[in-house]
Amino acid sequence: MSVKDVIKNSVYESLGGGTTMNAKTVILILLLACLAGIYIYAIYKLSSRTAFYSKDLNITMAGMPVIVAAIMIAMQSNLLVSLGMVGALSIVRFRNAVKNPLDLLYLFWSISAGIIAGVGLYTLVIVFSLTMTLLLFGLDRLPGTKAPELLVLRGRREEIDYDILFDTLDKHCRSYKEKARSTRSGETELIIEIRTKEKNPLLQALDDMKFLTQVNCISHDGECRS
């Protein structure tokens, strides 16, 4: 047999040859990917906030490691399957909007776990998943800075005593800043950003001011960096 025939046969076997993995290895890889998906499902359910939790997305992330691991096994089997997979995946587009940016982290976690399991790095899958869990829960435990609240005050334009108003804010707020002031139909509306630990006494003091016709305090669950 000539060298040309040897090269031709090797290329033919690489294009159409079967996988070198035995059935036991394939089952072990898919089982590990399945366990990784279940683990990610549980962690996502525990760590996600109720307002953003989606069971459908969670199930998708649980099944993704198995799908990716199966693709990796198929891509290792022969060159034709690898090219077919690349071509098929390159034309697939996902346009579903992600509501919570943290969901992207879990999606990449699921895909990465499937890839790592698919190439047979069993220990790395376990260490990687445990490290991600410690990172996510550790960062979530760090205290965040509470976002400031907004006071929306309305009063009769000619009667508002700004000296009394700002003296009251000085007394009950750590800091405050006027964000907007508008006047319409004889009424003035003030929007003031405040930081205070005496919310109830402040609102009571503002409510007692006769020149104010409406007092609103707006807060949200967001966080700020400073």
Image: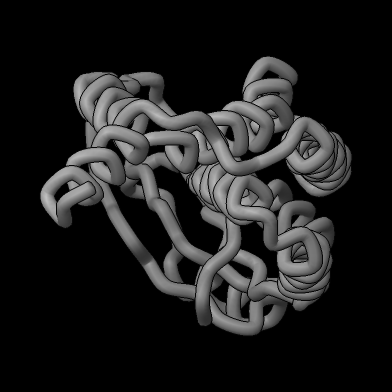
Name which residue lies at 40% across and 40% down.
156
The part of the image, by quadrant, that contains residue 36 is top right
Nearer the observer, 213 or 130: 130
Asked whether the viewer can see residue 221, the reply is no
Nearer the observer, 12 or 183: 12
Residue at the far left: name it: 4
Color style of the picture: one colour
Name which residue lies at 81% across and 48% down.
47
Name which residue lies at 55% across and 35% down.
19
Q: Residue 10, percent across and down?
A: 30, 45
Q: Residue 12, percent across and down?
A: 27, 33
Q: Residue 119, percent across and down?
A: 59, 53
Nearer the observer, 110 or 148: 110
- The relative height of residue 80 versus residue 206 in the rendered view (above or below) is above
- The relative height of residue 220 versus residue 24 in the rendered view (above or below) is below
Q: Residue 9, percent across and down?
A: 27, 39
Q: Is residue 175 left or right of residue 221?
A: left
Nearer the observer, 8 or 91: 8
The part of the image, by quadrant, that contains residue 218 is top right
